[in-house]
Amino acid sequence: MKKNFDILIIGSGIIGMTLAIELKKLFSDSQIAILEKESQIAQHASGRNSGVLHAGFYYSADSLKAKFTRDGNIAMRDYCQQKNLKINQCGKLVVTKNEAELTGLKELQRRATANNVHLDWIDEKQAQDIEPNVKTHQNALWSPNTATVDPKEIMNSLRQDVQAMGITLLKNTLYVGKIKNKNAITTNQGTFEASYIINTAGLYADKIANDFNFSEHYRILPFKGLYLYSNNNKTKLNTNIYPVPNLEHPFLGVHFTLTVDGLAKIGPTAIPAFWREHYQGFDRFNFSEFLEVIGRESRLFINNKFNFRQLAYTEVKKYYRPHMIAEAEKLLQNTKQMQFNQWGKPGIRAQLINTKDYSLEMDFKFEGDNKSFHVLNAVSPAFTCSIPFSQYLAKKIQGLIG
Ligand SMILES: Cc1cc2nc3c(=O)[nH]c(=O)nc-3n(C[C@H](O)[C@H](O)[C@H](O)COP(=O)(O)OP(=O)(O)OC[C@H]3O[C@@H](n4cnc5c(N)ncnc54)[C@H](O)[C@@H]3O)c2cc1C
């Protein structure tokens, strides 16, 4: 097996895949390989998300997320069209529960205008014309460009693109560590060498970056996203329905989304997980990770940074199905009749915290030099952002390589 490449990418999530494609366009003669520890692609965030192509109105206009969400929404809708992939162009309503939330709604409208994103300020009647059972206090926002896709279908299509471009994809290949004084790594399949090494390892990105002396002040805090599916979609939901989020946190609150096939689901939660791949029960339990994550969470709990105590308390309650449904019912009448009684596959967010002040990192982060590059905090909506974000990163890497 060939083990010497020009560019080696660790992690075949949507960021690893799209970045490999953009780098191959810039360096067409180079030998590029992607290493993936799992036996199949899309086993983590890129295959376990809500599948929403966000429009780009949640983030302040000076952030990378704002620009890349707006541009990524267009790029991914074009990609789906070009490749004949499923897309549900069902839009999104953002609704308010009370007078106080109108301030948050206005802030979202202001951010949309600043970021040049199409968003309509509508009244209760107009919201009910779109979704007859929706509940809102006086006003709502309508985002016509929000859409849903099938993340696994997109990942599969990207896998075909990668292979068609001559990029090597090596599955069952786990990064284990960096070899000192060499641009080489050890894996469970032996040693690999490369002129340039890129880390797009999602939940493990901080650990790998540490081996290369990066991510000094950043650590990943895993947050579990649970979904409840309706097995009776009689209510015929027309659109995605979201509450006004707490803009201090990167999570959007319990909401309704539609799949590409028109099935409804509620979620995802943002429950603090106890280890990185803590999907269910003791799956992938790792004692040292458990101690590390619990230590960090205990510290956040004691210091109550970013109101972590309240966040943990509010989120943990959502393990209880009736509570989750009650939360969703604040946005839509007749939720109970939709029979949300099937838990779906959970996903885990690789959220970065800054250990200098234990704050949550709200924007994408990356670090690198002329030998290696590390994508940190590729959290939601990095799926939507992936195409323009990777174009931007590929140019950055080109600049670093010189
Ligand atoms: C619950 C949830 C809902 C979301 N909803 C949305 C949404 O609706 N819209 C949106 O735009 N975004 C959404 N996101 C965010 C989006 O899914 C992620 O931002 C994106 O998938 C991150 O991609 P990635 O490539 O960085 O990570 P990943 O998909 O996690 O890929 C990382 C890869 O690295 C591999 N890896 C890790 N360690 C190693 C190692 N040591 N050796 C080899 N390989 C390794 C992993 O196996 C994995 O395949 C959501 C995320 C979650 C968790």
Image (tube, rainbow, N blue to C red):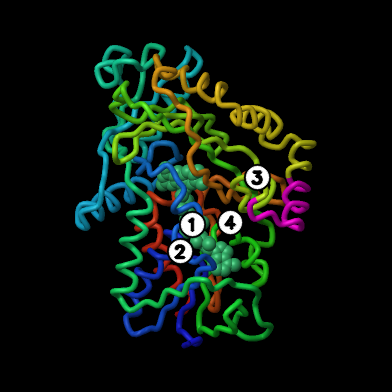
Front-lying residue, 93 or 284: 284
Say whether residue 285 is left or right of residue 334: right
Res 63 seen here: no
* Mark 3 element type: loop
Dot 1 corresponds to which residue?
43
Say whether residue 300 is left or right of residue 56: right
Q: Which mark is residue 203?
A: 4
Query: How many residues crowd around disc 2 within 10 Å: few (fewer than 14), some, or many (20 or more)?
Result: few
Query: Is residue 32 within the magenta segment?
Result: no
The chief SS type of the magenta part is helix
Identify which residue is drawn at 64% across, 55% down.
284
Q: Is mark 2 within 8 Å of ligand 1?
A: no
Say which amino acid is labelled 1: Gln
**Residue 214 in the image: above or below residue 322:** below
* Mark 4 element type: helix
Cα–Cα gap, marks 2 and 3: 22 Å
Query: How many residues crowd around disc 3 within 10 Å: few (fewer than 14), some, or many (20 or more)?
Result: few
Dot 3 corresponds to which residue?
281
Say which amino acid is labelled 3: Gly
Nearer mark to the viewer, of 4 and 1: 1
Does the residue at mark 4 contact the one at mark 3 (Cβ under 8 Å)?
no
Dot 2 corresponds to which residue?
40
Res 131 seen here: yes
Q: Is mark 1 within 8 Å of ligand 1?
A: yes
Quadrant assignment, res 129? top left
Q: Which residues are magenta?
A: 283-296
* Mark 1 element type: loop
Q: Is mark 4 within 8 Å of ligand 1?
A: yes
Cα–Cα gap, marks 2 and 1: 7 Å
